[in-house]
């Protein structure tokens, strides 16, 4: 299987393999969390989540698009009664709304009323996104609500929100890979890397 084949090699190999990005990308980024480290942490998180929910059915709601890879890897380690759904969150940049104001797109959200929800995002930065989404979910009559993030940036949080599950604390830098993007690129990288020239 290609995935496990890649994961059994150091990230340098993955990076230089035929499925890795072209070499020009290598100049502008530095691997922060290698693929193997992410995979083992995802297994740890899955064990913790499975232990917490046990016989309770859980609906995992991924925040699009950044949580996609994290969610896909995580759920395959979860031996639980499980549903999956998605929610969109994007910042308004229009003339009539202040920059950064968050728009919630619930079109892909399944019926969450009375369900145990685990809201999953890629990264907690200022905390605005997760906080806003938690507020939104709480209006929908969920039975319980927990949150999980793969990454939490240190020294950036503006609103107090403590995720129930956190993969890694990272320094204040712009990161890409494993779902995280720059102009919608780099989401497919199996590791998390600091993009040096992000503007
Ligand atoms: P807040 O500030 O609301 O941010 O906690 C959460 C959302 O902002 C995006 N974000 C990033 N995306 N690299 C990215 O690719 C980063 O370093 C980064 N920091 C924040 C992301 O969409 C996240 O859901």
Image: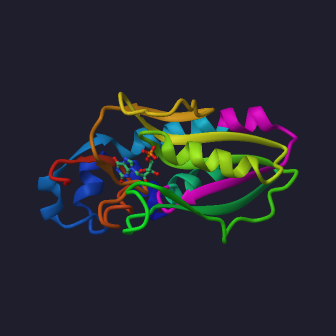
As drawn, the residue found furthest toward the front would be: 96
Residue 78 seen in the figure: no
Numbered range of the magenta stretch: 47-66
Above or below 91: residue 10: above
Q: Is residue 13 left or right of residue 2?
A: left
Q: How many marks?
A: 0
Residue at image coords 27%, 68%:
18
Residue 73 location, x and y as percent?
56, 53
| Quarter-of-image position of residue 190 | bottom left
Residue at image coords 26%, 53%:
13
As drawn, the residue found furthest toward the bottom would be: 107
Q: Is residue 157 left or right of residue 114?
A: left
Q: Is residue 93 left or right of residue 116?
A: left
Residue at image coords 63%, 32%:
164
Locate the C terminus and report the quarter of the image it occupies.
Answer: bottom left
Q: Is residue 31 magenta?
A: no
Residue 161 location, x and y as percent?
56, 32
Residue 93 seen in the figure: yes
Residue 193 location, x and y as percent?
28, 47
**Of residues 150 and 64, the one drawn nearer to the viewer in this rendering:** 64
Above or below 175: residue 87: below
Residue at image coords 35%, 28%:
155
Judging from the image, the colouring scheme is rainbow
Q: Is residue 65 magenta?
A: yes
| Quarter-of-image position of residue 105 | bottom right
Residue 122 location, x and y as percent?
48, 49
């Amino acid at each position: 299987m290609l995935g496990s084949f890649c994961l059994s090699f150091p990230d340098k190999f993955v990076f230089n393999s035929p499925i890795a990005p072209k070499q020009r990308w290598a100049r502008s980024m530095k691997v922060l969390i290698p693929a193997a480290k992410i995979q083992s942490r995802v297994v740890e998180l899955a064990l913790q989540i499975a232990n917490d929910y046990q016989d309770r059915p859980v609906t995992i709601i991924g925040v699009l698009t950044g949580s996609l890879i994290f969610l896909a890897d995580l759920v395959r380690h979860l031996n639980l009664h499980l549903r999956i759904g998605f929610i969109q969150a994007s910042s308004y940049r229009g003339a009539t709304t202040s920059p950064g104001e968050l728009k919630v797109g619930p079109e892909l959200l399944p019926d969450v009323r009375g369900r145990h929800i685990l809201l999953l995002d890629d990264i907690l930065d200022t905390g605005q996104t997760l906080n806003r989404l938690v507020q939104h979910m709480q209006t929908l009559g969920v039975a319980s609500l927990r949150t999980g993030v793969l990454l939490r940036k240190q020294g950036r949080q503006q609103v107090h929100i403590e995720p129930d599950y956190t993969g890694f604390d990272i320094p204040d830098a712009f990161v890409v890979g494993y779902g995280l993007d720059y102009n919608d690129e780099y989401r497919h990288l199996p590791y998390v890397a600091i993009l040096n020239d992000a503007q």
